[in-house]
Structures are given as structure tokens and as C-alpha cells.
Amino acid sequence: MHLETLPRFPLACLPTPWAELPALTRTLRGPRLLIKRDDQTGLALGGNKVRKLEFLVGQALAEGADTLVTAGAAQSNHCRQTAAAAARAGLRCELILNGKQPEIPEGNLLLDRLFGAQEYWIERAQRAATFAALETQLRALGHRPHLIPVGGSNGVGATGYVVAMQELMAQLHATGQRVDHIVFGSSSGGTQAGILLGARVAGFTGRLHGISIDKNDPEHLEYEIEVAQIANACAEYIGYDTHFTPAEVTMVYGFAGEGYGMVGDLEREAIYLMARQEGILLDPVYAGRAFGGLIHLIRRGTFRPEETVLFWHTGGAPALFAYARDLF
Ligand SMILES: Cc1ncc(COP(=O)(O)O)c(C=O)c1O
């Protein structure tokens, strides 16, 4: 394994803290709850993509790129963190965003602008074609673009979570903690792929539960196939000889509600509880939904009372400022 020698551009404040959630443990009358604070990775108000971007930007710089191109929703946390990473690395940033440009930029979009990213507004179905067209256009103008997939989810980006898993294991060891389950939100799959591979590399023996944020197709294993593919690409990238099958990916369905970015009672309850009992902000799209899913799993008796469950907070709070209408 050659993790230490891979191109990496430092962006994150690491290690992120972990903490107990004593009030929520009492309120939910379930297992002992811990939290890993990747909402505090530091860059641009934090989040999980900062870890991925250390390796993605490292690769872009190693290839001599001068522009990062990526895509996402209007309130994409990934786009916000990519725009900030580009600014930090002295690169240009071009963002392909879904839908119509809002009159007033709020939440993540406001921050994309502050970081100086260029925006292209498209219909989601045009995303792949726009990536290709933009690449051609940028090359014709003499630029050297580096394309980052949605969510930074490829083998290179997932490397950030292999390292994160090693970081968590070191924290648990140092304080004699045993964690039986790790729960986190999963969307484009790179975070889960990195945690899955990182767990194997670091010898974590507990269970991993990815809460599906936007997909609801347990039958076809489409998403499990994707996560396993990213984990395998990542294993190859870091030089670790292993292989994952889709059956080894635990995706928890049933919490995608009305669809991506649609806030319902599940997210509201999770956001309120975490804010009012622990003073921690969750976001309406990812961490709020993921923690809402965890609350339901606890109520369903998925975990034994003597077990310890770690919720991996993946960030996203800047989106709260674009969701005021949905939160009350
Ligand atoms: C706050 C937050 N949590 C979780 C995720 C999901 O991570 P992944 O796309 O790697 O599955 C994202 C993705 O954008 C995110 O922004």
C-alpha cells in the first residue's frame, strides 16, 4: 500500500473531533451515541468533501491542471468545498449546477460566488454533455481542466475516507472506545466506499450503515454496485490488494422521503433534536436525513442498548440558510 506517497494537497484541519452525545443517548433511550465531527474539517465551513478534495486536488496539481470542473445541485456542498479548495490551491473553478439560477444566491451558492467559482446552469439531464463540452471549450482556450465527478466520488476521492477511518481508529484506540456500528449519509457513494475500504485496511470489526439519501431501489443493488466499484478503484489507487462485492455494502433504504433535497418531518425532527439537545447543526439534505434515519433505526430496535453507535457527521450546515421556509 502506498497511501503515504499519493499526491495530496493539505486542506483539512485533522483530526476532526469525536464526542459523546449524552443527551440524545438519554432521549432516544437507545444505544450509546457518539459523533465524529466531519462538519469541522475546517475549509469553507467544513464537510466530508474536504477530505476527498485533498486527494483530488493533489492529483489535479500533479497533472498540471489549472482549472477544476465539477457539478452538483444548486445547494451542493461538494461544489462549495471544491470552489474553496480551488481558491486555496490557486486553481480556477467551474461549476455545472442543476436548474435555474436563483435571483439571490443563498447558502452554499452564496459561498461558491465568494470563492470566485464560475457557474453554468443546466438541466440535470445535460450534465454529462456539459462536462464534455466545457472540457473541450476550456482546452480550446488554453486551459488545463481537471474534471471531478459529482460528489468527488471516484477511487481518488474515496482515499480521503480510507485515511479518515484510520484517523477514527487511532482516536478510538487512544481512548479505549469500542464502536459497534458506524452510521452516515450516502449519496454519490465515495464516502461509503472509502469508509468500507478504510474499515478493512484498519481492521474495524463493527458494522457500517450507509443511509441512502436519494436512492430507493434495494432490489437492483444499483447503488451497492456503484459503492463496491468505487471501493475497488480506491483499493487499486492506494495499492491495497482486496476486492469488494455489492453484497458487502450495507445500504439502508426507506428514508429518501419525497426525494432529494425535500425536507419532511424526519429531517426536521433530527435537526431540532441535534440542535436543541447537543448544540450541533445538521443540514436539511444529508446529515439531517441520515440522523433522522438513525433515529428510526434506534426506535425500531436495530441496535442493542449496550452497543455503541457512532454517527459520522458529514457536514452541510451552510444549506440551512437556504432552507428557512422548510424548517419551521
Ligand atoms: C453533507 C453531506 N453529507 C453526505 C454526503 C454524501 O457523501 P457521498 O456523496 O460521498 O456519498 C454529501 C454529498 O454531497 C454531503 O454534502
Image: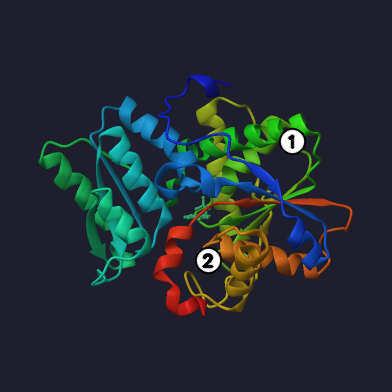
The residue that mark 2 highlights is 214
Which amino acid lies under the numbered mark 2 shown in the image of this protein?
A: Asp
State left or right for residue 167 relative to residue 135.
Answer: right
Q: How is the image coloured?
A: rainbow
| Percent of width and height locating residue 41 | 50, 42
The extreme left residue here reads 141
| Percent of width and height locating residue 24 | 74, 62
Task: Estimate how packed mark 2 is, as few (under 14), some (14 to 19) or many (20 or more) residues with alpha carbons within 10 Å.
Answer: many
Is disc 2 placed on a helix, strand or loop? Answer: loop
The residue that mark 1 highlights is 172
Q: Quadrant of residue 66?
A: top left
100 is higher (above) or lower (below) than 90: below
Task: Estimate how packed mark 1 is, as few (under 14), some (14 to 19) or many (20 or more) residues with alpha carbons within 10 Å.
Answer: some
| Percent of width and height locating residue 128 | 31, 56
Residue drawn at the location 76% of the way across and 31% of the way down: 173
Q: Quadrant of residue 101?
A: bottom left
Viewer-side residue, 216 vs 96:
96
Residue drawn at the location 78% of the way across and 44% of the way down: 179
316 is higher (above) or lower (below) than 257: above
Which amino acid lies under the numbered mark 1 shown in the image of this protein?
A: Leu
Asked if ligand 1 lies within 8 A of label 1, the reply is: no
Mark 1 or mark 2, which has the lower sequence index? 1
> How far apart are labels 1 and 2 at the CA level?
31 Å
Residue drawn at the location 42% of the way across and 39% of the way down: 53
